[in-house]
Image (tube, grey):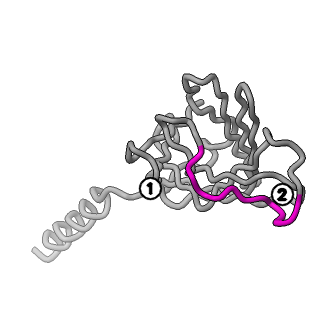
Amino acid sequence: MKIFRLFIYVSIIFLILFSCKKNNPADVSQLYGLWKIKSDSMGTRESLNLNTDKTFTYKSSGHIAESFSFGKWEVVKDILILNSVMPKECYYVLSFDGKCKSSHLLTDELIRKTILECESPAPNNFFIELDNSKFVITQDSLVHKITHKNCEEIPYEITLHR
């Protein structure tokens, strides 16, 4: 009888342990490489490259302007977090979260420079700051929600895909 009870207890513990859904972090190796942001109606092309050394590069190009960023990335559970590193050269700085979907225009916040008292090398080349920007990792995409106070449509999602 003791053996039977022991068997029942062990079986129950085994079922409890293996039936619990684990919140596994994303498989980081699946994130490496080039991700593209779906093009908008203005013909802008955007991409994000996640390197194996936990660095990233972001590029955007359109008809009249280009922008870029680089920095470090990390994964916490199923969230990709990007943080830019400011370049030592002079550029205008725009926030990744500082644009609205409907207008494709910058919000009315102050445009900063990478170096406070510098002159920008070109008015159509911007550094995009990703400051603790979070992307939800799904099976085939990365999804970022922008909830900027100056945007009419809240939230605005940016989806990256392979």
Q: Amino acid at mark 2?
A: Pro
Q: Is residue 139 shown left or right of residue 121?
A: left
Q: Amino acid at mark 1?
A: Lys
- Position of 120 compared to 66: left or right? right
Q: Which quadrant of the figure contains the N terminus?
A: bottom left
In the image, residue 131 lies in the stretch drawn in magenta: no
Q: Residue beneath label 1, please?
A: 149
Magenta stretch contains residue 109: yes
**The quarter of the displayed image where residue 87 is located:** bottom right
| Residue 87: mark | 2
Q: Residues within 10 Å of mark 1 (few under 14, many from 20)?
A: few
- Can residue 84 be seen here? The reply is yes
What secondary structure is found at the residue carrying circle 2?
loop
First reached walking from the N terminus: tag 1 or tag 2: 2
Q: Is residue 134 above or below residue 17?
A: above
Q: Position of residue 106 (x, y in %)?
A: 59, 45
Q: Is 127 placed left or right of 133 in the picture?
A: right
Q: Residue at x 56, y 32 (%)?
A: 161
Start-end of magenta stretch: 106-118
Q: Residue 40 versus residue 144: which sits nearer the camera?
A: 40
User: Percent x, y for residue 122?
Assistant: 86, 42
Q: Position of residue 23 (x, y in %)?
A: 40, 58
Quarter occupied by residue 129: bottom right
Which mark, by number, is residue 60?
A: none
